[in-house]
Image (tube, rainbow, N blue to C red):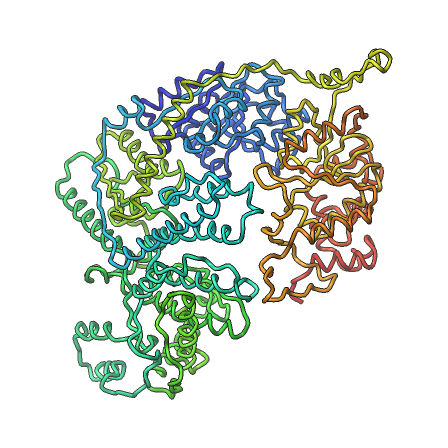
Amino acid sequence: MSTLLPFHKDIIQEICDPATSDLLVVARGLGLRRIVCSLMQIYDSPKNLVLLVNASPEEETAIGEELGIMGCRRPGLRVVGYETPRQERQALYQGGGLIMVTSRILVVDMLQSDIPIDLISGILVLHAEKVTPLVLEAFVIRLFREKNKNGFVKAFTDQPEHITSGLSPLKNIMKELQIRRVHIYPRFHESIKSSLERRQADVIELSQDMTESMSEIHHAIIQCMTSTLSELKRSNTTLDLDDLNVENAYFKSFNVIVRKQLDPVWHKVGPKTKQLVNDLGTLRNLLYYLLTYDSLQFHAYLETLIAANTTTSTGGVKQHQSPWMLTDAAHIIFESARRRCYTVSSSSVKPAAPVIDLVDDEDAWDALNEAEGIQIDKKGKGKEKKDRRPEWLPTGLDPILEELPKWDLLTQVLDEIEEEIVKLEMMKKSGPRLGSDTVLVMASSTRTCNLITDFLSSHNPTGTKGAKGRDMMMQKLRVYLWWKGKLSQRKEEGKSSFHLPDASSTAASMKDPKGTSLSEALRKKDKEKAERNQSRRRVRGGAPAAVASDGRSTTKSSATGQSSSAPAKPEADVLAEFWSQVTPDASITPFDVSSIALLDLPDLDDNYGLVVPSQTVVVRAYSDDSDDRILAELQPRFIVMYEPNMEFIRRIEVYRSASPGMGVRVYHMVYGSSCEEHKYLAGIRKEKESFERLIKERATMLMPIYEERREGTGRNEEVIKTISSRYAGGRRELNAEPSKVIVDMREFRSTLPSLLHAANILVIPATLTVGDYILTPEICVERKSLSDLVASFNSGRLYTQCELMSAHYKHPVLLIEFEEDKAFSLELITEMKSYVKPTGKYPAKKKPDAAAPNNTTAYSSVSVQSKLVLLTLHFPRLRIIWSSSPFSSSEIFTDLKRNQAEPDPTKAIAVGADDDPDAGRGVNTAAEELVRCLPGVTAKNVKYLMSRVGSVRELCGSSLQEVQQILGVVPGKECWEFMHKGEKQ
């Protein structure tokens, strides 16, 4: 754990007071996790009960390890998850200390009084930028403040850009968290500025120019984005689309901004607008892939775009194609991308006829020289052999294999670092030097890290500029050519296509065409090694091979007009024919995993043991605050930023300031005049503007006055307002019982229980067999979102649910709830896909006609309406309520409960559970829910099944006769076949 800097101590000193509640907004990369952990270390005591909520699983692990390093081990941080039993959770709460719990579990425990709310010392809320009236964290704070007025609430965020949209976003967050103090710490804060600028790292900025082909593709993509944005604005003149510009399109949040603007009218816009929105995301990916993918990967991705633009997933002709692919700029993109990989110099791509030439048969000459004891210098011959054209390369196809310019720049940087390390070793003084000689290379993604690792492990240090990774690129070209030929072959066989496989030697999950994994190839390596070598010699030495057909010609790849997708098909066909001719022996495959992945493996015995730090290069992708810990553990003195990242630059500043006396050199690499540089500068500018808005809002913000709300107050206010003097002069005895709703445990994933509690309704969590919400003894509600509605219709679950509600309640209700910011229309169903697998009980539906105009949508609003009509005809007492949002659902529930009796939780739990008063109170609710989902298991026989079988494992191990004795012949067979489906006989 690194030492705290002066500005860290200032922040902790301001917010550590347990008598106040605070919101901290800090710039990314300045060590927010370090501040949170230091604060938790202060509060760590059995006398305090401090809860941490809204943390991701990765943060749970990282914070726990960080607190362990800091010494918080007795008892330290405990994590409460879904697998923690109720009794164990109660014991943890009673014991005090630091507890990390999910918001959903905490809400249920608070409502069931499993946690002593009055004994909670405080709550720490991470990711405060996500807090809205609909999230469970706001529900937690309301429940906490009802019974505890003295506890503190500390909220943290390092995403100021997310708190600048909407009307008074900062005030809304503070209102939901019931916080009155906010602390804002941008990078330009005086204390942060003085702390970080005291010791600065040696930064070397390296601006690398793109190649000519990359520049052409880059400008063409920007041109396509500009035209797409203009067309989108022209098609939707009624919407406010001023934020849609090329600069914002660099960021991943751009797709969210576009959909947020169009969601209310998404069902009204035409297919052209929807295609334009998808195209913007595709073009943004192209910009990123251009600078991070190698030339072959980028070209393969473009070819998949061409194929996806012309055909649908069902094989039909796509009706609405991407407009940008029909432009001249798209032609430049496709042509330049192909020229970066290879050129076709002849009219046909065919293998050369094998000729037996004993003069060039080096294997025979080597064997003869070895037998006669003659030593030959192989240096010159090795070079000649290396420059020889490979046998698997089609004639007429000239590989270009343009490498990324940063690869050569990276090798130069590593050579300079190596020279610097040697120089420092020679000038080494008597005292030990701080830090290690390990070189840390940081990139934007794991895929980029893998590519860098492959290049560094296989590059030729003595090669010319732009050709140091030739061996790796030739290996990738071989895989690419096999992939192209295989695509055409699978298309003729009617099989689905697949992505370009990775040809790296570390890809342990690669498979060859026969499905043999790399692990299987390893096991068969010794057995097949001789056969492979003989096969290779036989092909090269002149085994009879088929002559290529002269009638098949290769068309050069072009992307002009509507024929932009035409070149991919003939080229793939020719390559498929080439592979069929060049590999007459069935034992040879064009993509032999073992020959590619295993021939270049080094001898592990030579490299066994610890590697010297000066010979170690660590390649890692940018992450969250865990990068601070990596810097503290490795303590590198040389850091290479392969791609610019604002957050990591600040982490280096904090790391350098926390390590006095250590010299740190940073190489900052960026493509000049590219989207990479523009995105980096735009990100800095957007964060600065966001902090300025927050500071301005804090200066002019009206602080809300929180009303004194206690448990049970305000429940009968609406009843009092609706008293009529016509009935007994208004002297009718009021119902003193509070208004309450019984909510199923699984419904706490949604936002409706939180809104019901905000509407002064007592929410009682329970495990219900029938329904999701019990409003009155006679009204049972089953809530369905649109996606859940479609899935319930497909699986038949909705029919069973309506059948149970109609059997046990007088007024069964089906609530169909829409999302708040989306259209209140069933047309949204056409955008959904079903992931429900067919059961095989009914015959499969006929596939839609490929020529039909609506073949891209599996569902439509008409089909759902027809199913709803059939549902109401079968269940006449079923009532369907349409709700435009969760807020509307809360108001509907309030109206339905007016002047009605309150439900009994005990009776509601027992309904549908064979009148068992202890039903729903089992120790393993998840196992019971799993058993209920099995075929053949119904609400009537599930209890009997659980009484006969001790566990799910025992049920799965039972024989067919044993299951049939419990469930019956037909249901038992269905259940047993479902559990044992796919087993090898």
Please name whichever residue, 848 or 322, is drawn nearer the observer in this view of the structure.
322
Please name whichever residue, 270 or 788, is drawn nearer the observer in this view of the structure.
270
Is residue 252 shown to the viewer in this render?
yes
Is residue 598 shown to the viewer in this render?
no
Where does the image place residue 861, in percent across and percent down from the top left?
Answer: 66, 51
Quadrant of res 690: top left
In the rendered image, the vertical position of residue 855 relative to residue 49, given as above or below: below
User: The C terminus lies in which quarter of the figure?
Assistant: bottom right
In the image: residue 76, left or right of residue 410: right
Residue reaching furthest to the left? 427
Where does the image place residue 524, in percent across and percent down from the top left?
Answer: 45, 70
Residue at 26 percent of width and 47 percent of height: 673
User: The N terminus lies in which quarter of the figure?
Assistant: top left
Callout count: 0
Where does the image place residue 892, in percent across and percent down from the top left?
Answer: 71, 31
Residue reaching furthest to the right? 728
In the rendered image, the vertical position of residue 753 relative to residue 839, given as above or below: above
Quadrant of res 549: bottom left
Residue at 41 percent of width and 60 percent of height: 325
Residue at 43 percent of width and 27 percent of height: 36
Where does the image place residue 488, in percent across and percent down from the top left?
Answer: 46, 73
In the image: residue 54, left or right of residue 7: right
